[in-house]
Image (cartoon, rainbow, N blue to C red):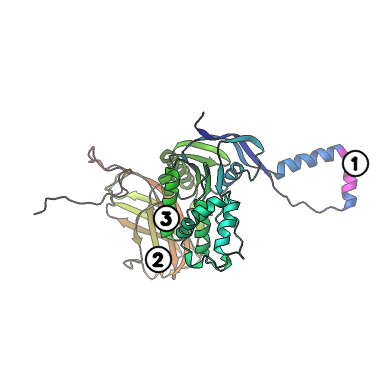
Amino acid sequence: MEDVVIKVEGIGKRYKVAQREAYQTLRETLVRQAKAPLQWMRKNREATEKKNGYWALRDVNFEVRRGEVMGLVGRNGAGKSTLLKILSRITEPTTGHVDLWGRVGSLLEVGTGFHNELSGRDNIYFSGSMLGMRKAEIDRKFDEIVAFAEIDRFLDTPVKRYSSGMYMRLGFAIAAHLEPEILLVDEVLAVGDTAFQKKCMGKMDEVASHGRTILFVSHNLAAIQSLCQRTVWIDGGQVAGVGPTRDIVENYLASSASKSDTDDLRERQDRTGDGTARITAVTIEATDGSPVLRTNSPMKLTITYEAAKPIDRPRVWAEFQDYASRKVICAFDSQINDELPGELPANGKVECLMESPRLTPGRCFISLGIFRNGHTADELERAISFDVEPAETASSHAMTRQWALTDVPHKWRIGE
């Protein structure tokens, strides 16, 4: 118990949800109360509790040890941010309690404490003090913060004139130089461009290597796997699993995939595009007669779609991803070789034949889209999932998903 620095026991958070009620005159209300006052009061209280009560969290329990980087994953609305607000003492839990051993720093929103009229220099001190840093600590780290944010030329310029990227870089730079024993981080590694995101990842690695305890929330599962030894999965306000990050992420994605596999794609709401065409079904199968998909199986991807009228200048693409949402293959695009006709019928199917893609064993996901006349008609992320089995002739040393995403045919030889 002495190495536990965060202990969450039976945490629950209930919010009241405002409900629109039918308008009643004062006379109607008085008459109802006069006829049956006790009954009216009881029904009114029960209706209020039933309609206005929403449990964002319920009976959440877990522990984080000293020096551990713990991940927190879950769908939007699962209760992750609510949990961090409770741990940060921003809001009180309805039930349960939290024990924290050590100074807590929270990075729940990039740019906390910024004042638009103040310069970058002034905001470093202003925001730093809001985040719990002492002036002597800010003085000591001032040059590091400026260098990390890459804003030295604009240090004395009001932040209202900063670009959004500069604003976010400065906000993260300040928070990243906190030195609490416990750091709570909510989806902040998505700031800035790709180069700065890599810099953020490196900084988080550095913080973790110094033995500080971190609770890290992110939808970037690759970042979760890179930084975190263990992960908590929150689903519907409750803990669905706690354990090694790889196992939890696989279970989390398998759960998401199983739901999408059983649902009709017509009902999927998490899609983008103008809706002039819609993907209604997707299947993938081996074309060599095998009942399963193997690393050397030729495959056929079939996309069923519907539209109100024929699709002119069509383009269809498909992208394969692994369980961490990393791209495996992104080469199946009808536009590359101009393989589709200039117009597709309003309702129909398109097929993509793949000649033995050497996918390593494991679960894959397919994201895809359909374009009309250069505009996105429909796009679906992780539309379906499928499992790749080892080749029947695989040796005991065959590659696995832990080794590589794809197995590219190759040969070795001794140079002449």
Occupied quadrant, residue 228: top left
How many discs mark residues in the rendered view?
3
Q: Quote the CA–CA distance across marks 2 and 3.
A: 36 Å
- Report the amino acid beneath label 3: Lys
Q: Position of residue 91 (x, y in %)?
A: 65, 44
The residue tagged 3 is 199
Contact check, label 1 and label 3, Cβ < 8 Å: no
In the image, taking residue 23 as reference, residue 213 lies left or right, namely left
Q: Quote the CA–CA distance across marks 1 and 3.
A: 70 Å
- Report the amino acid beneath label 1: Lys
The residue tagged 1 is 35
The residue tagged 2 is 315
Query: Which residue reaches farthest left?
Result: 416
**Badge 3: residue crowd in 10 Å (few <14, some 14–19, many ≥20):** some
Q: Give residue 214's mark.
A: none
Q: Magenta residues, as a range?
A: 29-37
Q: Is 191 placed above or below 237 here?
A: below
Helix, strand or loop status at disc 1: helix
- Report the amino acid beneath label 2: Arg
Residue at (31, 67) in percent of width and height: 337
In the image, taking residue 40 as reference, residue 283 lies left or right, namely left
Q: In front here: 280 or 218?
A: 218
In terms of sequence position, does the residue under pointer 2 or pointer 3 come before the other? 3
Q: Is 242 placed above or below 161 here?
A: above
Q: Position of residue 19 (x, y in %)?
A: 73, 50
Contact check, label 1 and label 2, Cβ < 8 Å: no
Q: Is residue 306 magenta?
A: no
Query: Which residue reaches farthest top?
Result: 1
Q: Is 308 placed above or below 325 here?
A: below
